[in-house]
Amino acid sequence: MTHAPAEALHELAHRLLSPDDCARWIALLRPGLRLAHADDGPVAGRLGGLPDLPLGKPWPEWDGHGPLSHLMSLDCAALSAAGDSGLALPASGTLLFFLLDGRLDDEDCMVYPGDPGTRAGSRVLHVPAGTPTRRHPAPDALSPYPEVALTAQAGLSVPTSDAPTVRAAFGEGLDTRAWRTHPVNARPFDSALRALDTHPSRSGHRIGGHPVPVQEPVEWEVARGVLGPEAVGQDARLDEAAAEWVLLAQIDTDEAADMMWGDAGTVYWLIRPADLAAGRFEEAMFTWQCC
């Protein structure tokens, strides 16, 4: 969904929405960083390549399944310099994202939030600044993804119309036919929003802000993983549990990095704000969606 400057989004809302709807909608906007290929601008991180791991720290593995692929490394200081991510990220150091991505076992064992036994297949690590590191070679069985430099662009992100935060703000008519033609979903507002987005064709790589789902809200998937298999359908607890999680990072399908998630999908890490503030990145939950 749209990622754009605050001024443009506020002007659009005041122009096309009623005062009440405008206030509700603007309150839902979240700051975040879009990660784009660093053709111009300072480098904030990179997709693929080899990670800089602390000396003596082994390459992350899922016991019994093999090594995890290194998907992304981010410079926390560069992210902070780029603008407001909306997250209590470390001010310095490096964030590393790893995933058992199915390349070694032909997707025989994938990571899903609803299966706690697969959580070891995803890893987010923070390497503090000043930690002695080395560019760790990849395990013999694993080829690294091509390295693609990234730059970070600050802006506000817009939730999708079925996001839990939208359901909470406009809930009185959300499940009626009228909701589909509500001004925040109507074609004039939707078209104007899309016109503001500089990358409308893909959900993109992001840090913070609202996740861009390929299917249903990713917060629901994580909430179901926490609540357990009894949380099905429109369980009333889902929105409440989903509201506890925020987007840490999403990585889109990216041809330059040779990353394809299912059928042109996206992978996501969500985290509770309290865990993020305490640096408990091991508590981040992974999920993925594809077309």
Image (cartoon, rainbow, N blue to C red):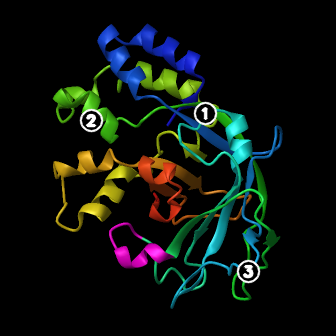
Q: Position of residue 15 (x, y in %)?
A: 45, 8
Q: Quadrant of residue 79?
A: top right
Label pair 2/3, CB-CB below 8 angstroms: no
Q: Is disc 3 surrounded by few (<14), some (14 to 19) or many (20+) residues within 10 Å?
A: few
Between residues 211 and 273, which one lies in front from this camera angle? 273
* Residue type at the position of mark 2: Arg
Q: Rounded to the nearest whole Å, what is the CA distance between mark 1 and mark 3? A: 34 Å
Q: Taking the image as drawn, is residue 14 in sight?
A: yes
Label pair 1/2, CB-CB below 8 angstroms: no
Give the structural element (helix, strand or loop) at label 1.
loop
Label pair 1/3, CB-CB below 8 angstroms: no
Q: Quadrant of residue 24?
A: top left
Between residues 233 and 194, which one lies in front from this camera angle? 233
Residue 166, above or below 204: above
Residue of label 1 = 84
* Disc number for residue 283: none
Q: Is residue 89 left or right of residue 14?
A: right
Give the structural element (helix, strand or loop) at label 2.
helix
Q: Rounded to the nearest whole Å, what is the CA distance between mark 2 and mark 3? A: 47 Å
Residue of label 3 = 56
Q: Please provide the residue range marked out in magenta.
A: 112-120
What residue is at 48 percent from the left and 48 percent from the top? 247
User: Considering only order in the chain, which callout, 3 or 1, is on the residue closer to the N terminus?
Assistant: 3
